[in-house]
Image: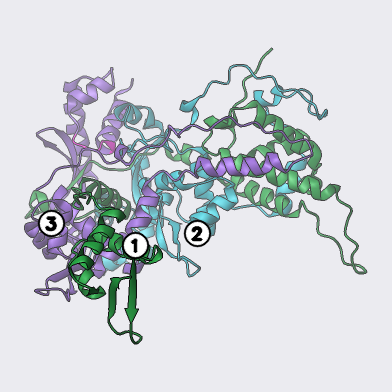
Chain colours: A purple, B cyan, C green
Amino acid sequence: MEDAYKKQIVEGLVFASDTPISEQKIAALVEEITPAQVRKVVGQLNEEYTKSKRSFQIARVASGFQIKTRKDLSPWVKKLFKGRIRARLSQAGLESLAIIVFKQPIGRVDIDAIRGVNSGGVIKTLLERNLVSIAGRSAGPGKPILYGTTKEFLNYLGVDEIKDLPKPKEIEEIMGKLDSSEAVADNILDALTAGDELEAEVEVVETEPDNSATSLDDHNDGNGKTE
Amino acid sequence: MEDAYKKQIVEGLVFASDTPISEQKIAALVEEITPAQVRKVVGQLNEEYTKSKRSFQIARVASGFQIKTRKDLSPWVKKLFKGRIRARLSQAGLESLAIIVFKQPIGRVDIDAIRGVNSGGVIKTLLERNLVSIAGRSAGPGKPILYGTTKEFLNYLGVDEIKDLPKPKEIEEIMGKLDSSEAVADNILDALTAGDELEAEVEVVETEPDNSATSLDDHNDGNGKTE
Amino acid sequence: MSYRIQLQNFEGPLDLLLFLIRKNEVDIYDIPVAKITGQYMQYLEAIELLDLDNASEYILMAATLIRIKAQLLLPKPVLEDDEEAEDPRQELIQRLLEYQRFKEVASGLGDLESESRDYFKLKNLVVEDEEPLPEDEQWLGKEDVTLYDLMSVFVDVLKRVPPVTEHTVESIPVTIDDQSKYVLDLLDLKESVLFRELLGQIKERIVLIVTFIAILELVRRNRVAVDQTNPFSEIWIRKS
């Protein structure tokens, strides 16, 4: 393998990796390259970037190499992200948010009841990050505050109006297995075989419960954390 | 602002953006740059990348620019993502996407009608992979949820706009094709004895239930978020 | 020679029909329904429908084919002048053509998918910043949380909700005989009782109902009589 090509592979791997990538990892992937060579090649690449005034460098962080945009460009990049919702949501945040999105308008007591834990702190964060807002007050005793999604967050989700959001029942329909019931198949079959003098003979043995019914559990595991 | 610096800003923004970024967006962020200049600069950058044998290019997808690694490096990157590369879409997934992209916004019932089968599970997979999304509600009875394709769909296929996709042919064109069709070479074909006789016998040996044949996609795994 | 037939190779009844039409090299606008139906049935018999997710759709199509076949066998209705009878196959043909159109698009999309799988996005990037954001305050990327993600979290949370609607149901042993005796015992003490007062003493709904039935039963057996002077006025119950 030519040195020039090695350099391209190293660069390509650093670019495409979804996490910082170490020289050991690269060497393990590409037999002809040693960790030392990786370090050397990265040095060469950075020199080339500087010379050709590229807007980035390969930086070394604890776990490996990573692409970093140049510091002097950060005002522009910041502008790019401006107006975006600032949030890396915790599992608790995500849960409360999901409840508010699909059950809005909803009060804190009901969110707590659904989650089984106090959600006060999480709701505060969601309010701060402009994901949810106060949507009114309940008519019930104490007139508790009700929460709903902000226009910005709906927009982020790609939904025009609250009424376009799927209702809990529709969510279950979408997320669940939507098999047309076996019973329907049987009925059609009965009607078919009974009324037919032509020649159709469709034989169907008793239908068994559908084994493919992937339960909702299969998706999205590893949640279950509460605050 | 110097042209050289403009180039660096454009490059930096294309690098930093996590989704394809359009020339309009860049022009909106950087006053001194026009959309036409962005396109010109991107062309220059790609030339420089080619000349200096960079491992990537700026590609135009989903109405914007995005960094992509060179095709010839894919064996190495695939090695990096081994076991984490998302499964390809199933035939059912592709069919449903074909219908949704050209009939959007469209409800599940209409997709089912065209395909002749229930598409609930497939739609769920497409939603999960963010290739389609909820695009509103029909005004019709029951106000069913309607689906449309996402930007990620264009991104996934590496296409700039919907008009760059293969279009549904006119009925006449399909007819021509069907008439001149060479019979599909399939061993299924051979299974029927010379198809002319009505009483053709089908010989079947060991039709064991083959659950594995249903594509992974439909009963989706919800794992590897990589591409 | 033996072959294995898998209907899993077909995406559904329309797909199977298109295959049969192509295989027989027949004109899609002039489908020989008897022949195609026969072959379609053979396929259905040959495979185990039970293994299929779409069994009902395959059967439904069989019914449709048989209906069309029957319609074709019936004498054509006599129509006015140049009015033409609609071909019973028409609707099916349109469906097949429509499906075929999208099947072709799907195959084109599949090609694009194959092609795009050799290109990788830049993912391993940090934006160097003078004052970096704290770890938990990064920008929410456009693909970080989708509506689908929220739906799936929502479903998960709902599944964890503890069942709050716990009712303890106690069976209340009460029979018509018991209540008949109760009414009669009361009437032994007093000559007549107000219907309102009689029922007013009873707390449980089921006992109320049973007592009412008991009174009706006693009236039927002529053991008690019911008096009411005016409509909506008090009802008295007495021994007859």
Q: Tag 2: residue type?
A: Ile
Q: Find disc 2 in the rendering and name its residue.
A: B106
What residue is drawn where x is 89% and y is 53%? C75
Is the Cβ of the residue at disc 3 closer than 8 Å to that at disc 1?
A: no
Q: Identity of the amino acid at label 1?
A: Ile
The 10 Å Cα crowd at callout 2, few under 14, some 14 to 19, many 20 or more, is: many
Give the structural element (helix, strand or loop) at label 3. Answer: helix
Residue A18 falls within the magenta-colored stretch: yes
The amino acid marked with disc number 3 is Asp
Which numbered mark, 3 or 1, is in the foreground of this view?
1
- Is residue C17 shown to the viewer in this render? yes
Q: Is residue B37 magenta?
A: no
x then y, percent, for residue A76: 20, 60
Residue lying farthest to the right in this orientation: C81
Residue A53 visible, this orientation:
no
Q: Quadrant of residue A150?
A: bottom left
Vertical side of B215 occupied by C130: above or below: below
Same chain for mark 3 and mark 2? The answer is no
Q: Which residue carries the number 3 mark?
A: A112
Q: Tell me the crowding category of disc 3: few under 14, some 14 to 19, or many 20 or more residues within 10 angstroms, Cα based.
A: some
Q: Quadrant of the N terminus of chain A?
A: top left
In the image, residue C71 sits, relative to residue B221, either above or below, namely below
Residue A158 in the image, given as x and y percentages of width and height: 34, 62
Q: Which residue is mark 1?
A: C213
Magenta span: A16-20
Q: Which chain's residue wears label 2?
A: B
Q: Position of residue A38 (x, y in %)?
A: 20, 26
Q: Residue at x 27, y 32 (%)?
A: A13
Viewer-nearest of discs 3 and 2: 3
Q: Nearer the viewer, residue C64 or A197?
A: A197
